[in-house]
Image: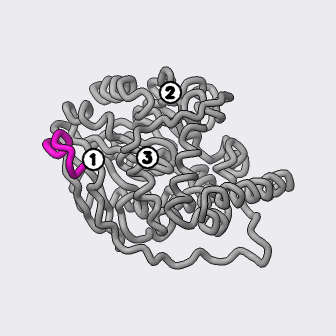
Amino acid sequence: MTPTRSRRRLLLTAAALTLSLAAGGAAGWHPPGGAPAAAASTTPPAASYDAATRHDAAFNATFEHRFATVRGVRMHYVTGGRGPALVLLHGWPQTWYEWRKVLPALAERHTVYALDLPGLGDSQGSPASFDKKTLARYVHGLLRDRIGLRGFDLVAHDLGGGVGFQYVSQFPEQVRSYVHMDYPLPGPELPAARYRTFSWHMAFNSQRAVPERLIDDPADVREYLTAFYPQVAHGGAAFGGTRTKQPFTGAEVEEFVRTYSRRDVLRAGFELYRSLDADERDNAAAARVDTPTLLLTATGSLAATRPAVAPLLRNITRAAEIPESGHWLAEENPEAVVREILSFTAR
């Protein structure tokens, strides 16, 4: 598919979504003729899990890639460092690699575990569901049953924050402290339907089958992701700006495009959004969290994020905006993120 054709299809679908949203059908629009089930994945197992790090001598001196199977899902993670365990959960459309810039400094004080969420990145296989309550149980199976962790600090960003909250809610005895990064939680204060109105991509990604039909080859994946990343970066459209400059390095973009070009991973990413209604119900019913919590957001986002988070995370001992940063906190201002995390986990 040529870029021109791809853009045209995306624009046509955006117009249809706009009409759907205006009619109150944010999650229900689908192409004429019904909502076909997603095609079964034919993607072979990833053979290039270390593509971004294979020739990085400094990285390989400290960190290594590992795999473990949890309930039929082969989960990928990166680990290294020394000290108390620190677990990192990524968001969309990213992988463990979103933490690449902060890992070396964190590993000086912690044994770090940067996970690919079930079904995403270089993890293989599909979990029973992509609601965050279910994903948290897969993460629990990895951390407790396969790795053998009994206590750790937990950091989670974006939709990984949905998994992070559910993890701390279900297994509070395991988590010493929790860092929740730039993710308003669907729940009693934020219905999923309203959450989807915050950005066009939340409504688009929630549609049944449509995203996979339009973003159906690696060229489309590259075009979608590279167009999306600047929009929620500092100065991007999501923050009222006009930024078009890419917030990531070429290596970061290549790594994310590599993983999301796998058909099953692309679908898994969309399922994170299709399950927001289940997340709303699960979060409303979840045990409230009293674990000491650090809330970090993009510049200018704290006032909007905290009301949706505070009723569920009841022990927010510090809340801060990362200076000169949009949504991609760990890439846009890694030094500030490292300072905040290490200061908090040292308490």
Quarter where residue 84 is shown = top left
* Residue 199 falls left or right of residue 249: right
Q: Which residues are magenta?
A: 53-62
Reply above or below: 292 against 21: above
User: Residue 325, labelled with which disc?
Assistant: 2
Q: Residues within 10 Å of mark 1 (few under 14, many from 20)?
A: many
Q: Nearer the viewer, residue 177 or 46?
A: 46
Residue at the location (36% across, 57% down)? 139
Tell which circle, 1 or 2, labels the residue nearer the N-terminal end: 1
User: Do we see residue 83 in this rendering?
Assistant: yes
Residue at the location (37% across, 55% down)? 116
User: Which quadrant of the rendered structure holds the C terminus?
Assistant: top left
Dot 2: element: loop
Mark 3 lies on residue:
253
Mark 1 lies on residue:
113
Q: Amino acid at mark 3?
A: Val
Residue at the location (40% across, 50% down)? 254
Dot 3: element: helix
